[in-house]
Every structure is written in structure tokens, then in C-alpha cells.
Amino acid sequence: MSASWLFFIGYGTVFLGLLAGLALWRKKNRKTRAPFPENAKLLRGPGETLRRKLADLDERSTYEVLIAFILPLIVGVGIAQIATHLEGTEQLVGLALATLALLISLVLVIRRLVNGIERWRNTWLGYFGERIVAESLEELKPQGFRIFHDVPAGDTKNPFNIDHVIVGPSGVFAVETKTRRKGRARAGYAEHQIIYDGQVLAYPWGEDRHGLDQAARQAAWLQSSLEQLLGQSVRVQPLLTFPGWMVITRAPGAVTVLNPKQIPAALALRGTPALDDRQIDLISRQLDARCRDVEF
């Protein structure tokens, strides 16, 4: 093995070791001399799961950019070695293979970077959508409602999160947020409208049940969980919301479908309260304990 290869391998090993060491040091020293108690935990904010995913994607992108820099460099060193130590036909064949390897590595690296950017783009869209819904729900608080975001649910084998849970005089509501990009509209359909007939969602480009079954399952899980914890019947109503879209309901269904701005008016109490203050507080305590896991 030539001296240049030894230098390159040694340099790469030391460089990657330093990166790993810095990552561990940053994680270990995050809580150093913090003014908060070690066991301090905050409630989850809107889109907490997606916020964490965005942070992971940002950190991963740093390493992927490094790989994008190092991988072609390794192949380039190989090409240089071939050009230096081989002659004639062997050199031509070696250069052709090395060049092919360089092109393949570049394609793989670029594809990985593009996929990473697309994942980040979609995650950010979902995160921003949940923030929009959370702002709309703030109007409910003066009316005695309590709002919980990104509620952890499921078990260790099948974990999931409920985007928003609303607890108030008119009942308990499990809200699923779907932030969908707009597409080309078919003839007779407006590009900004979703039409709900109680069974199917009609988008400008076609029909599906995207989010309806999920919202119903999550509400059923939350209802079962609260009933087990409290030892009493608790009704949880599923609600599906689409930020940025105009939602038109032609017929009611098992799941209520609304634009976020429609939610406060839809949940406003218009008759006898479904829950009194004691029940609201009891249910809220359970949700608070489940959602209070954000550490410094």
C-alpha cells in the first residue's frame, strides 16, 4: 500500500473519530450547569414528534454531506493511483472501471441527498401544519377547554401519536392533522376544496379516505385508554382537519372533517355540558402526565 493511501486512510479515520467524539461530547454536556432541575420536563408542543424528526434529519444531513464529499474523493484517489502505477491496456481498463465507480458513487450520493431533502421538506410541511392547527385551537382555552399536543399513544411495539387532544365542556376530541399539498384540479372541482360526503373525501384530483380511518382508530384507542385509567365511561370523538384547505361537508360521518378555523365554532358548547369541571380536570391530569416528557 502506497504512502498516499496510508495517509488518506489515517486522515479519514482521525477525522471521523473526531466527529464522533464531538457528537458524544455535545450530547454529554447538554445539561452541564443548566439552571433547571435535572428532572424538569415540559409538556409537548405542537408537532413535537416532527420537531424531533427534523432535528434528526438536520444532524443526519451533516454526515451525509461529509459522505458526499469523502466517497468521490476516495474513488478519485483510486483513479490517481491507477494512472500512476499502471501502463498500457491495464491502465485504460483500470481508469475506465474507476471512472465508472466514480460516476456510480456520485449518482448514489446525489440520490441520497435529494431523498433526504424531500424527507425534510415533507416533515417540515407536516410540522408547520400542526402549528397552524394549534394556533386555531387557542381560541378554545377561554371557553374552558384544555389542549394537549402530540400525545404519545400505543405501546412499545406499535407507538404513534395523536396530533391534538381537546378536553372541554363539550367533550373529548382526538384531532388528526393532514397537511396535503394542492394538485391539479379535475373539471368541476376547485383546487382549494375538499368535499366530505360522510364516507369519502373528494380532493381536486380524486377521492380517498386518507386520514378518516386513522382518526377513528386513534379516538377509539384514546377512549379505551382513558376508560381503563379512570374506571368510567369516556366518549372520545374523532376529528380530522386539513390546514390550508376549504372543507365542505355534504353529510355527517363517523369522523368530523373541518378546516382548523372551523374547529372552535364546531366545539362551542350549545347545550348541557358533556363534562363538568371535575371530569375535565381528571381527564386533563392523565393527558398531562402522558405528554410531560420534553427534557432539556
Image (cartoon, rainbow, N blue to C red):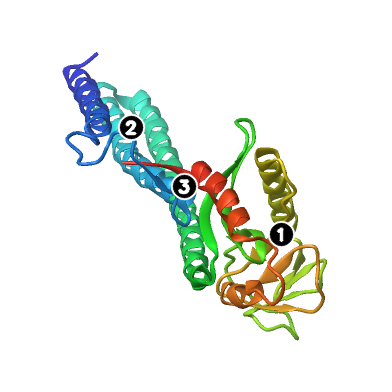
Which is more toward the observer, 169 or 31?
169
Which residue was labeled with disc 2?
Answer: 75
Image vertical order of residue 97 relative to residue 190, above or below: above
Image vertical order of residue 92 relative to residue 210, above or below: above
Is 48 left, or right, of 247 in this rendering? left
Q: Earlier in the sequence, mark 1 or mark 3?
A: 3
Image vertical order of residue 194 relative to residue 14, above or below: below
Split into 4 quadrants, where in the image is the C terminus?
top left
Q: Amino acid at mark 1?
A: Gln
The residue carrying pointer 3 sits among few (fewer than 14), some (14 to 19) or many (20 or more) residues within 10 Å by Cα, namely few
- Specify whether residue 216 is in view: yes
Is 219 left, or right, of 78 in this rendering? right
Q: Amino acid at mark 2?
A: Val
Q: CA distance from mark 1 to mark 2?
A: 58 Å
Which is more toward the observer, 150 or 245?
150
Residue plotted at (45% across, 44% down): 292
Q: Under tag 2, what secondary structure?
A: helix
Q: Position of residue 36 (x, y in %)?
A: 25, 41
Q: Earlier in the sequence, mark 1 or mark 2?
A: 2
Q: Position of residue 129 (x, y in %)?
A: 51, 64
Q: Position of residue 289 (x, y in %)?
A: 50, 42
Residue 111 badge = 3
Q: Amino acid at mark 3?
A: Arg
Q: CA distance from mark 2 to mark 3?
A: 18 Å
Image vertical order of residue 184 relative to residue 34, above or below: below
Is 52 left, or right, of 235 in this rendering? left
Which residue was labeled with disc 1?
Answer: 237
